[in-house]
Image (cartoon, rainbow, N blue to C red):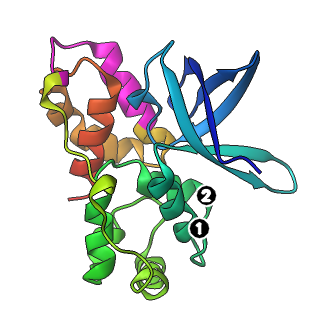
Amino acid sequence: MYEYLTGQVTVIKPEYLVLELGGVGYRLLVGNPFKYQLQQTATIYVQQVIRESEQVLYGFVDEAEKSLFERLTSVSGIGPKSAMAILAADDHSGLLNAIANEDVKFLTKFPGVGKKTAQQIILDLKDKIKITPEMTTDLNQDLFAPTNDQTLQDGLAALQALGYSARELQRIEPKLALLNAKTPDVYVREGLRLLSK
């Protein structure tokens, strides 16, 4: 129904953001809401998922990420929430390499993905997904600045919203605190990298 929305980001929460377009605020569930900034004008690709009790708009950085979401949700055992947790890491090349190399261990690091589901992802997607340059992003070192405890807590809240347990987050929090990042996005990306080890 919708392909993408262009508007102003008016709300950023650990689980979602609100994109205002023509006086209407669209609540979008995105993998990492903190990669956006308040009052930023953004184009976000969307996928509407309708279930018996809810209608949800999932948001993506680009068409490639949206396509990857669609392929992941076509796998038995992977729902939209699990797919978003998998896509929250900006470095999709790790995911694609794991599928191409049949790396079950890497895939089971994501919340809600056990060994059988990881094997199913590989079976269903190995011949359907190819790595493309636009699907990879490096951690931007320019985002580092003095420590902001609320920023770290926002990053941890976003990771928890993706399905990681409090125990897992407590294990990586000291390492994240050393980053002194100025945006929660950096904490989310680095947290996802640490949690996938």
Q: Report the amino acid beneath label 1.
A: Thr
Question: The magenta stretch spans which residues?
Answer: 143-158
Q: Which mark is residue 73?
A: 1
Q: Which residue is mark 2?
A: 80
Task: Locate residue 86, reporting x and y percent.
Answer: 43, 57
Residue shown at the point (27%, 62%) measured from the top left:
93
The one nearer the camera, 92 or 3, is: 3
- Would you say the residues marked 2 and 1 are in contact, meaning their CB atoms lie under 8 Å apart? yes
Residue 87 quadrant:
bottom left
Left of 10 or right of it: where is 156?
left
Instruction: Tell me residue 25's x, y (percent).
Output: 72, 22
- Provide the secondary structure element on which disc 2 rests: helix
Identify the element where label 1 is drawn: helix
Q: Residue at x 33, y 55 (%)?
A: 135
Magenta span: predominant SS is helix
Residue 168, numbered circle: none
Relative image position of residue 177 (x, y in whole percent): 18, 26
The amino acid type found where label 2 is placed reads Pro
Q: Quadrant of the C terminus?
A: bottom left
Q: Is residue 95 above or below residue 121?
A: above
